[in-house]
Amino acid sequence: MGRSQELSEFQHGTTIGCHLCKKAIRDISLLLNIPRSTVSGIITKWKQLGTAATQP
């Protein structure tokens, strides 16, 4: 199975913005049409590293 396309910086920022506005992970997932695991991963990485940018 192929790898899916990476999210844009805008989608990463929108995800973090929704999280800061106290939206639930499920709600963010439905709003942006991306998997819950991806939303959770973005938020976790942002909390740990302080950035939502794609790392090499």
Image: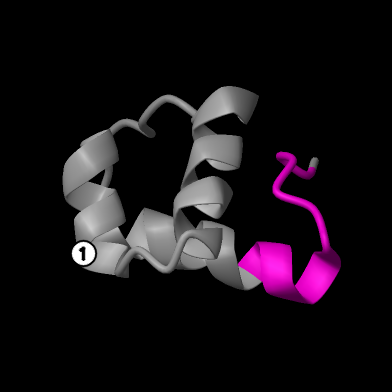
> Would you say 55 lies left or right of 14 here?
right
Q: Circle 1 sits on which residue? A: 26
Which quadrant does the C terminus fall into? top right
Give the residue furthest to the left.
30
Name the outermost residue toward the front: 21
The answer to whether 34 appears left or right of 52 in the picture is left
Instruction: Give the residue drawn at x 57%, y 25%.
Output: 10
The span shown in magenta is 45-55
Q: Position of residue 14 (x, y in %)?
A: 51, 38
Where disc 1 sits, the SS reads: helix
**Image x and y of residue 38, in percent:** 39, 55
Could you tell me which residue is drawn at 74 percent across and 41 percent down? 53
Residue in view at x 64 percent, y 27 percent: 9
Q: Quadrant of residue 54?
A: top right
Query: What's under tag 1, amino acid-wise?
Result: Arg
Residue 13, image x, y percentages:
60, 38
Residue 35 painted magenta? no
Q: Residue at x 38, y 34 (%)?
A: 3
Measuring from the top left, give residue 37's x and y in whole percent: 33, 64
- Describe residue 53's horizontal placement relative to residue 8 as left or right: right
Q: Is residue 1 visible?
A: no
